[in-house]
């Protein structure tokens, strides 16, 4: 195995750790946090985020806790276009001890999970093609 092959495989392993870690984190949060209905109330645009000055959007959701508090928050994820339209009803999961910490929808978790599986399959394929020994 050549040096570039090893570097390539290490990069794949790094991305598996990154996307796998994000997937596990969100799944753990979703398992232990209660779910509630929320409404997208805004899509914040930041022109300084993103590549080539393209800017990024973050969806802001609002929901009520069982004790009647109104919470307005986001899951801190950004995308190149709004993930949800204003007024969209969706399910969020939130930290009871800190309700501003939320997981909005499942789209990012599913994407990270799929990327992880594809990268693992690619790593297995690469290792069978390029034996370590």
Image (spheres, grey):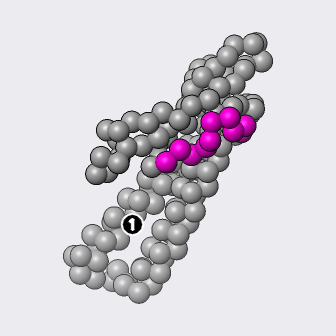
Q: Mark 1 highlights which residue?
A: 12
Considering the image in quadrants, where does the N terminus appear? bottom left
Residue 9, quarter of picture: bottom left
Residue 88, quarter of picture: top right
Q: Which residue is drawn at 57% across and 62% down?
A: 114
Considering the image in quadrants, where does the C terminus appear? bottom left
Mark 1 nearby-residue class (10 Å; few <14, some 14–19, many ≥20): some
Please provide percent x and percent y for residue 71.
Answer: 63, 20
Q: Along the horizontal axis of the image, is 38 left or right of 84? A: right
Examine the structure image and report whether residue 83 is included in the region drawn in magenta.
Answer: yes
Please provide percent x and percent y for residue 104.
Answer: 62, 39
Please provide percent x and percent y for residue 70.
Answer: 67, 16
Residue found farthest to the right:
66
Viewer-side residue, 79 vs 19:
79
Question: Which secondary structure, mark 1?
Answer: helix
Viewer-side residue, 108 vs 72:
72
Q: Which residue is drawn at 31% across and 51% down?
A: 51
Q: In this view, does 72 lie above or below 132?
A: above
Q: Give the range drawn in magenta.
A: 81-90
């Amino acid at each position: 195995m050549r040096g570039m092959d090893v570097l390539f495989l290490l990069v794949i392993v790094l991305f598996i750790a990154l996307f796998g870690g994000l997937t596990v984190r969100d799944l753990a949060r979703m398992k232990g946090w209660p779910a509630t209905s929320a409404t997208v109330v805004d899509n914040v645009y930041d022109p300084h985020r993103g590549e080539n000055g393209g800017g990024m959007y973050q969806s802001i959701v609002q929901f009520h806790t069982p004790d009647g508090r109104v919470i307005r928050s986001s899951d801190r994820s950004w995308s190149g276009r709004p993930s949800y339209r204003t007024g969209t009803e969706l399910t969020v999961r939130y930290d009871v001890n800190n309700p501003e910490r939320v997981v909005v929808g499942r789209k990012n978790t599913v994407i990270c999970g799929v990327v992880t599986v594809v990268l693992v399959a690619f790593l297995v394929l690469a290792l069978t093609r390029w034996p370590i020994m």
